[in-house]
Image (spheres, rainbow, N blue to C red):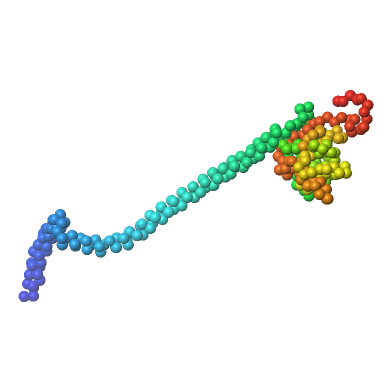
Amino acid sequence: MTSRRPHKTVLLSIPMRTLTTRVTPAVLVLMALTLLVFHRADMLPVESLRLVVTDKMAPVMAAVSRPFVALTDSFDGVATLRQLRAENIRLREENAKLQQWYESALRLQAENQSFRDLLNVKADATLHYVTTRVVSDPGGSFVKSVLLPVGLEDGVAKGNAVMSGHGLIGRVTETGTRSSRVLLVSDLNSHIPVLIQNTRTKAILAGKNTDLLKLERLPIDSGLSVGQRVVTSGDGGLLPADIPIGTIVEVSKDGIYVQPLADIGKVTYVQVINADADPSLQTGDITPTKRK
């Protein structure tokens, strides 16, 4: 009896396993066909079931996809940041170039204005002049002078008048082979013989190391007034006559003050007037001599 039971169990299990193996594929195929038919038929229960499954799975799929979306955004952000940095570098380079062009334009504009001012000066046709650029500014509290990159080789001599586009700014006091120093009319050591136009009153125009010049050695009751122009008189033979210098802006008990026509602190280009001085005007000897 004991030996027959295991034998029966083996005999019964073999047909069941075989049956399951054969039936399972058919059941799965039938279920698939049933779901396909239900889906194509648009039946309400199936659609409701599909919506329920979708509603349940949507948050799960969103949560699963969120890290991938964040990673994609990070890569896009890195690419965008790299593009922004490259664009920033390019814009900085363009800005630097534009700044250089702007500065060049301002410099050329200033030079053009200086040349225009020089062309407006009615210089004596018999005089020779050299146009040059100022290479140093009139800085300093006690000495008001500038340097010019022209000298003896260019025909510049000591005592020559120096003009801007508006009028006299000084005279040459030192001359080298290729450079010269100009003492400005505003310097304390500057004393220029002048005339007041319309009245022909003579005086000495002295610098005071300030923006204004002072008229000295005036005759009593000269009757000068604000607005009258001051020009060189030509006395002494060093400076040509009738070069405009400034305008009287103050008449008071302290004296008569003149405002230079030229903005001395902003002069860029100047003209050095090469006027041959008559030796008799400097020495007082009127004996006829042959001039060089």
**Point 75% across, 31% down: residue:** 123
- Image coordinates of residue 133 in percent, x first then y, are 72, 37
Residue 230, quarter of picture: top right
- Provide residue 266's location: percent of width, then percent of height: 71, 43
Q: Is residue 41 above or below residue 157?
A: below
Q: Is residue 146 left or right of residue 66?
A: right
- Name the side, left or right, on which 223 lies relative to 166: right
In depth, the one of 132 and 34 nearer the eye is 132
Residue 54 appears in view: yes
Please state if 53 lies on the left or on the right of 226 as rendered. left
Query: Image quadrant for the C terminus?
Result: top right
**Residue farthest to the bottom, as pictured:** 1
Q: Quadrant of the N terminus?
A: bottom left
Question: Where residue 150 sits in the image (x, y, percent)?
Answer: 76, 35
Image-based side of 264 in relation to 11, left or right: right
Residue at the image position 72 percent from the left and 41 percent from the top: 267
Location of residue 59 in the rendering, given as x and y in whole percent from the top left corner: 29, 63
Identify the residue at horizontal 78%, vertical 35% (top origin).
Answer: 243
Q: Residue at x 78, y 27 (%)?
A: 126
Can residue 150 be seen here? The reply is no
Q: Nearer the viewer, residue 121 or 215?
A: 215
Q: Quadrant of residue 22?
A: bottom left
